[in-house]
Image (cartoon, rainbow, N blue to C red):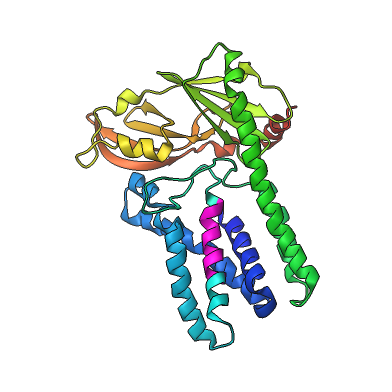
Amino acid sequence: MDSLTQIVLGAAVGEAVAGRKMGAKAALWGAIGGTIPDLDVFLRFFYDPLDAALVHRGFSHSLLFALIAGIFLMYFSGKGSGKKYTHRTWFLLWFLSIVTHPMLDIFTNYGTQFFWPLDWRLTFNSVFVIDPLYTLPFMVLLIGALFMNRESKRRRIWNWIGIGYSCLYLLWGVGIKLFVYSKTDSYFEQAAIHPKRAMVTPMPLTSFYWDLIVEDDSCYYIGYKSLFAPFDPKQIEVLPKNHQLLKNIRWQGKSRITEIEHITNGFYAVEQHRDSLFIFDLRFGTTTTITNGTSRNPLLGYGFILKDQKPEKLFSHRSRDFSKINFSVYWDKVFGK
């Protein structure tokens, strides 16, 4: 999730663990703990974009890292505060504020390598990486709690209501995703499409609007489902896979297809534009609905700059079409208008 959300979650956990003992400092330490796993973003300066994507949300987002970091920070925090707080209090504060970060990220499109060193990325793909309906109520309840006296029972109640709300919202997302996924085949059969495999992901900023991607041997078919309107097969987009364009591409002497398939869970499309070969990560969908059809480019991906059909540079790609976002039309689609 985004940094603000992780700060809110970490602060709420810190408050729950030690707010009565430490006051607002517990939320501050928890907020710091909640941001620690994402410090691995700085590793991108030492890796190419594909390797950086593999490293991100790896070890730093694992249960093992949370245990090691929790013990390490417990020791130094305990020394710094003398005997004012127990080692148990410090360990629980650091461990829980750190481990809940990757636990939350498991629900996003990215997922995490929570059981590192196992290579398996755990993802429910049931909440978008930025979702105001998750973050804002949680944040309001936390801020309200922090303005109350540390001994106040109401302060603890408000904070736990926020934590409870966050958990229920995540469960809501999983439940809705499973419901939509169970209907995917019947939705696409309305357009005489019989998919081999399907992926369902939340659309940007909401859990009320879902991106449905299915595939056959040569193409992806992308549809959209609002919880407030029937599925419309006329909105289905067709995106050729073009995986063959990567067949002869070698970067630093080796094919990168295995890494690309691992990062994207096998849902990627390839397009060539002049001297650039774009690899689109379809887990994040396209810009079609958020731009009201003025752009159909996928949001995220990677690419090679080619020279004589050989890769000269590997880069990460983010759509430049965000300036075309039409929020009024997008929200109409979200609510099925």
Q: Position of residue 122 (x, y in %)?
A: 47, 45
Q: In this rendering, does residue 172 appear at all?
A: yes
Q: In this rendering, does residue 290 appear at all?
A: no
Residue at point 56% right, 70% down? 92
Report whether 218 appears left or right of 177: left
Residue 95 part of the magenta-drawn span? yes
Residue at point 21% right, 42% down? 252
Seen as rendered, the residue at the extreme bottom is: 82
Report whether 145 appears left or right of 78: right
Residue at point 62% right, 74% down? 26
80 up-or-down from 24: above or below: below
Report whether 295 appears left or right of 312: right
325 up-or-down from 236: above or below: below
Q: Main structural element of the magenta stretch: helix, strand or loop?
A: helix
Q: Position of residue 116 (x, y in %)?
A: 39, 54
Q: Nearer the viewer, residue 297 or 258?
A: 258
Part of the protein shown in magenta: 93-104
24 up-or-down from 1: above or below: below
Residue 80 part of the magenta-drawn span? no
Seen as rendered, the residue at the extreme top is: 192
